[in-house]
Image: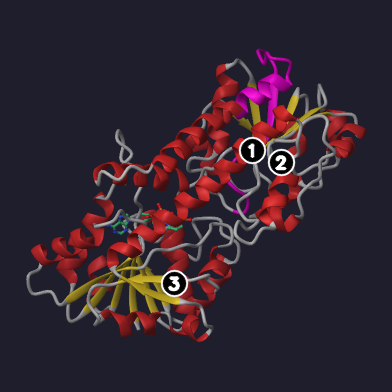
Amino acid sequence: MRIAMIGAGYVGLVSGACFSDYGHNVTCVDMDKDKIARLTNGEIPIFEPGLGALVASNVHSGRLSFTTDLQEAVVDADVVFIAVGTPSRRGDGHADLSYVHAAAADIAKALDGFTVIVTKSTVPVGTGDDVERIIAETNSDADFVVVSNPEFLREGAAIEDFKRPDRIVVGLEDDRARPVMEEVYRPLYLNQAPLMFTGRRTAELIKYAANAFLAMKITFINEMADLCEKAGGDVQAVARGIGLDKRIGSKFLNAGPGYGGSCFPKDTLALVKTGQDFDAPMRLIETTVSVNDQRKRAMGRKVIAACGGDVRGKTIAILGLTFKPNTDDMRDAPSIAIIQTLRDAGATVRAYDPEGMEMAKAALEGVEYTANAYDAATGADCLVLVTEWNQFRSLDLRRIHEVMATPSLVDLRNIYRRNEIETAGFAYTSIGRSDQTTDQAPSALEAVE
Ligand code: NAD
């Protein structure tokens, strides 16, 4: 199959590389000239484990290439994927579909012969109809069908998720697309990954329903954490106690500083707006959005409380800036609101992240970046663990204790045990584990979910 992938970001680049690894011929198109120049030079513009090697081997085999020329990629393609961004629209929180619409118009002009156009971007229900209309209006001779194929990969585990998905959802209204999509996903189909065919609108809704449900689950356990702190309980034991119930499941039950990232915040907001548009209010998700928004700044106040209620003139060291480990993505990371709260309260903020500091510089002002965790801790009055990168799980506590001005650790991911930290001479604050409880660190497996 000849595939054109429009958009070579986190989703487009991973999907393009994986499709080429299945044996398809893939051309990734991006309008960002710098991104394409870097890719053409063998550089990977994002941090995603395993992606460099996957791209290199498929470029080497001649099945994967990069261009800024959409026309050249689309004219020969059997299948064109749209994997452009759908950020929140400034002002109202609806998904901004301008990139999708522009891509559809550009694709329309380049179509030649029967082509399946697949929306992989996360788009509100009904967008497939818009794409179909835009293409038909732009090129009345075009022979095409529009399919919805939402992507469920997680940054940091994107290749594994793409190659071993829980399911592949394909929404279509025209059966001519079905054999084409079966061929595109043939290697996964042979691996028995469930390929689920639905109507196009249903597929669009499935993606938002999945993200909103996961965001709600995280928000639920975060509220339980607050209750545990006040009532005297251990949220990790609560999470385990409910997660072992197969109807609930143990994933996405790690209490923390609130969800962030490139998907959950914008997708929950967009679903709320869609619900309002259709007069079917998504009240649970409205509440989820508002609880989560408040939580991020509340985490800043938690740090201030751990510093005795006043951080003016104090230095706070932040470990981990990205919204989760194993990515450099800073979009809507909780660290942004936490750091802003601390700076507003008069603190000096110093930070270290293994991969996210370049991206962080664009999102955050007035932060001093350091070369490692120990430099960040030097002279600090409080060390705040915001993102659970593996290297922060085994810090040399004695060394940290020696270099800090005041040995105080705020662990917003519950990766340490109170006993261990207090024995090392630190004051310790964590999430959802009251002073009375004997808390337990989660297993490594649970912690990365
Ligand atoms: P991204 O911002 O990393 O990448 C989008 C790319 O599209 C950019 O490089 C941009 O330059 C390019 N682009 C925009 N318009 C274009 C056009 N007309 N022609 C060519 N290139 C164009 O975004 P992303 O994180 O890859 O997300 C893409 C979509 O996938 C979004 O809808 C997102 O919600 C969804 N999604 C993302 C993830 C994730 O983990 N990032 C997971 C599942 C789904």
Query: Going from the N terminus, do you reach mark 3 or mark 1 first?
Result: 3
- The quarter of the picture where residue 168 lies is bottom left
Which color scheme is applied?
A: secondary structure
Residue 96 on image: x %, y %: 29, 46
Q: Amino acid at mark 2?
A: Val
Indicate the position of residue 377 as horizontal and vertical percent values: 76, 31
Tag 3's secondary structure?
Answer: strand
Q: Is residue 144 left or right of residue 5?
A: left
Residue 84, position in %: x, y? Answer: 34, 57
Locate ligand 1 by image quadrant.
bottom left
Q: Which image quadrant: the C terminus? A: bottom right
Q: Which residue, given by chain and number where applicable, does mark 3 sit on?
A: 168
Q: Are marks 2 and 1 in contact (CB under 8 Å)?
A: yes
Separation of marks 2 and 1 at Cα, in angstroms: 7 Å
Instruction: Confirm if mark 2 falls within 8 A of ligand 1.
Output: no
Residue 372 is at least partly visible in this image:
no
Q: Which residues are magenta?
A: 299-326
**Nearest to N terminus: mark 2 or mark 3:** 3
* The N terminus, quarter of image: bottom left
Asked whether 221 or 257 is in front, the reply is 221
- Residue extending farthest to the right is 423
Q: Which residue is mark 2?
A: 235
As measured in the structure, the alpha-carbon distance from the residue carrying label 3 to the one carrying label 1 is 33 Å
Callouts 3 and 1 close, C-beta under 8 Å: no
Q: Nearer the viewer, mark 3 or mark 1?
A: 1
Residue 84 higher or lower than 220, as above or below: below
The mark nearer the N terminus, 2 or 1, is: 1
**Does the beta carbon of the residue at mark 1 sit less than 8 Å from ligand 1?**
no
* Position of residue 394 in the picture relative to residue 12 (left or right): right
- Circle 1 is placed at which residue position? 224
Which amino acid is tagged 3?
Ile
